Image (spheres, helix red, strand yellow):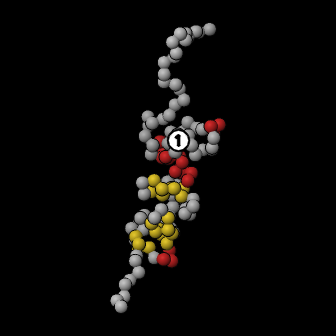
């Protein structure tokens, strides 16, 4: 019976071999323990505290700030929404959401200045 070597996986972050003693399995890949960090804040992650977006891994807080609804991540609920657009996280300017209606007033509604 021929000898078959154990399969060696490549870390998606550093592209080096990952051996069993140093692996963290998450998002369908095997990572080095030291490479398994948030792509923005560099916080060490665990398989249950991470989120994936287009192959990149983030902590849940940074994921919410970068990819969630604008204002999310700095509290929770409508009372804590902020005006942060996420430009410091790479979000493009001009994609801000507004709470102002963009429809015409109903017929017969007159605008009175008092």
Q: Secondary structure at mark 1?
A: loop
Query: Horizontally, is 9 left or right of 41 in the view?
Result: left
Q: Which x, y percent locates residue 76?
A: 63, 43
The extreme left residue here reads 2
- Residue 44 appears in the rendering: no
Q: Quadrant of the N terminus?
A: bottom left
Q: Quadrant of residue 8?
A: bottom left
Where is residue 88? Give x, y as percent. 48, 44
Of the pair 39 and 68, the residue shown nearer to us? 68
Does any portion of residue 40 appear in the rendered image? yes
Residue 69: percent from the left, percent from the top? 52, 41
Q: Quadrant of residue 84?
A: top right
Residue topped by disc 1: 69
Answer above or below: position of 40 versus 93. Answer: below
> Which residue: 53% across, 51% down?
62
- Picture quarter with the C terminus: top right
Position of 3 relative to 92 (above/below) = below
């Amino acid at each position: 019976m021929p000898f078959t070597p154990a399969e060696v996986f490549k870390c998606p972050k550093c592209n080096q071999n990952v051996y069993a003693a140093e692996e963290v399995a998450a998002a369908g890949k095997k990572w080095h323990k030291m490479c398994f960090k948030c792509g923005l804040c560099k916080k060490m992650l665990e398989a249950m505290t991470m989120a994936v977006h287009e192959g990149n891994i983030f902590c849940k807080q940074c994921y919410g700030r970068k990819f969630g609804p604008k204002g999310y991540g700095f509290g929770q609920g409508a009372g804590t929404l902020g005006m942060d657009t996420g430009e410091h996280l790479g979000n493009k300017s001009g994609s801000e959401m507004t709470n102002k209606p963009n429809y015409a007033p109903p017929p017969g509604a007159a605008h009175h200045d008092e």
